[in-house]
Amino acid sequence: MAIIERVFLKNFRIFEEREFFLKSGINIIYGQNGSGKTSFLESIYLMNYGKSFRTKNIKEILNGSDLYIEGEIRDNGFSDIIKFYYDKEKKSILLGDKKVKISDMIKKFFSLYLNSDKIHRFFNERKESRKIIDILCSGIYPLYLKELLKYNRILRNRNRLLKSIVREDFNYKSWTDNLNNQGNLIKEKRYKLIKEMNSILSRSNLEIRLFMVKDIENLFIKEKRYKRTLQGPHLDFIRIFKNGKDLSIFGSTGLNKIAFFDMIDGYLKIYKEKRGSTPLLLLDDFDSDLDYNNLKKYIYGFETQTILSFVNKEFDFIGDVNIMEV
């Protein structure tokens, strides 16, 4: 997997023009609130996924009439340039001079963005836990994102059918079969990845459990009443247990963050085994909710290119890292 070495920003949020240089190991960006730390992480995410994790409206991130982000990545000794343009309400992602799809970009360059709020919602919101497991699966399994997008298209069409259906007919059975067949591909990969992560997490007395909606009796009648699909992987969610206890119920904010990072560390090991490399970690507000010893543990523990944002400049325990101030 590629290592990102340079990021150039033009007309992006508070940055009229700014260039950052990164190293392959630990990179720290620090500054006061509102100085642009999260914006810098957002720019990398935007190049990777073609969207922001902060807003659906790209116009909100403009600092001028157009937006340009350029990233230089190195993979197996070869350099490539990623370019993200937004001009006249059109966006484009180029690898070199060729336009690419998000699914193709993820194969080349894969990043994970996490912050304290996202981790908190992972433990408290089913939707967020699904999003996390889907992101993790998309990094491991090249076809997962396409399979998920196809499932969501079938789901939308099936829900439209349920809103208009007045009697049981062949269309309902056909859409149900299509949804189940596609959904099984999603569930199979989620279950497989979780099983592999649990083999690593068991050393820390942690376990990830996948919760799925059980078969519903009189499904057609109930779905016709509620006018939406009531069964499938779009309703599944995951929870982390420590010593048999659900951390979403019994865990503190700090304990949950530690367990979450242990899960990510296990994922990195599996990713490296299967892909021969590791993804880029983008960890925002990294120094919140962690004590001194755990800060050291994870800074030195993540064996991948990592960008951490800090509010406070307290790096006395840090050795060979790249430090950037905004």
Image (cartoon, grey):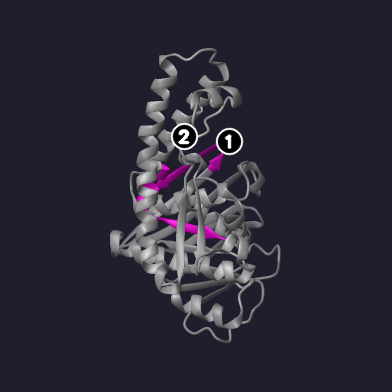
Residue type at tag 1: Glu
Location of residue 284 in the rendering, given as x and y in whole percent from the top left corner: 59, 64
Q: Quick one: label 1, few (<14), some, or many (20+) residues within 10 Å? A: few
Which label's residue is closer to the chain start, 1 or 2? 1
- Element type at mark 2: helix
Name the residue that disc number 2 marks: 152
* Res 215 visible: yes
Asked if the stretch drawn in magenta spans residue 89, the answer is yes
Q: Are marks 1 and 2 in contact (CB under 8 Å)?
A: no
In which quadrant of the rendered view does residue 74 lie?
A: bottom left
* Res 96 visible: no
Q: Quick one: label 2, few (<14), some, or many (20+) residues within 10 Å? A: some
View extreme (right): residue: 33
Location of residue 12 in the rendering, given as x and y in whole percent from the top left corner: 61, 52
User: Which of the image's four quarters has the C terminus?
Assistant: bottom right
Location of residue 175 in the rendering, given as x and y in whole percent from the top left corner: 42, 24
Is the residue 91 above or below the residue 72 in the image?
above
Name the residue that disc number 1 marks: 89
Of residues 115 and 156, the one nearer the viewer is 156
Q: Is residue 79 left or right of residue 39?
A: left
The boundaries of the magenta stretch are 86-114
